[in-house]
Image (cartoon, grey):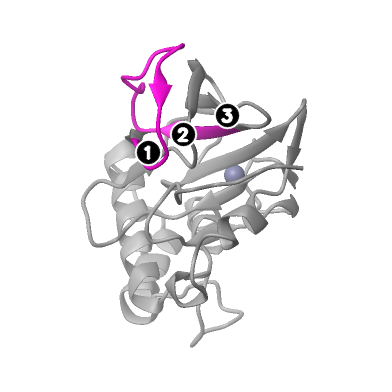
Amino acid sequence: MNIQFNSLPVIPLRITSKYGPRNIGLKGASTFHRGIDLGRDFSKTETVILAVADGVIANNYWNNTRGWVVIIDHGNFKTLYQHLKKQSLLRKGAKVVDGQIIGLMGASTKTIKGMAMHLHMELIVGSKQINPEPYLRNIIPKEMEVIDLTEKQTRRIVQDEIKRVLEGRGTKVAECFKEAWEKAQVEGCSDGTRPQGYTTRQEVVSMIQRSEK
Ligand SMILES: [Zn+2]
């Protein structure tokens, strides 16, 4: 199969959820992950999403689960980018080159509760989604890649997510929620299984979901 990426979709590349079977404890999220999730660039307020190869915009639409979506047709394969912050300015039929900005990373979805900001990306060959990770690895030096989150990054995500939830409900905060907040302030990693280690975005989001109940 002749699949070649020439740009990373997000720089730096930080894979927060891999392709394959999974259970992230979020209602509405898939149990077989047909793509990979990439985290945001913590050094910037917005994270841009880039076309991985030359192509034509095949679709640009809203879906209640996927949020804002862009699909690029590269000829013998397609790439899909979802949960964009807002609708891409590139409309169906527009030509794109590798490395071109196609939108901003967001958390758009209507059905997945408690989802954190990330890019869900799929590689589609024919009508099947295959794992895009090997094609991303083809074009990055190993040292550029960050798989999981550092404790500092985790702390920031937890704080952002809790703030977002609090702003969303406005009023009462459950005791367990306060505990999670305090723990997050001190430890960053509130998952509990690896107190001094790294944690993933999914673990953070699951933890926040639990603390909301
Ligand atoms: Zn995903």
First in sequence: mark 1 or mark 2? Answer: 2
Q: Which residue is mark 3?
A: 74
Which quadrant does ligand 1 occupy? top right
Q: Is residue 150 above or below residue 172?
A: below
Q: Is residue 76 visible?
A: yes
Asked whether mark 3 and ligand 1 are closer than 8 Å, the reply comes as: no
Residue 109, position as x, y percentages in the image? 48, 29
Q: Nearer the viewer, mark 3 or mark 1?
A: 3
Q: CA distance from mark 3 to mark 1?
A: 24 Å
Q: CA distance from mark 1 to mark 2?
A: 6 Å
Q: CA distance from mark 3 to mark 2?
A: 21 Å
- The residue range painted magenta reads 79-100
Amino acid at dot 3: His
Camera-nearest residue between 188 and 50 = 50
**What's the mark number on residue 106?**
1
Camera-nearest residue between 24 and 175 = 24
Q: Is residue 82 magenta?
A: yes
In what quadrant of the picture does the N terminus appear? top right
Q: Nearer the viewer, mark 3 or mark 2?
A: 3
What is the secondary structure assignment of the residue under circle 2? Answer: strand
Q: Which residue is mark 2?
A: 83
Residue 78, position as x, y percentages in the image? 62, 30
Contact between marks 3 and 2 (CB within 8 A): the answer is no
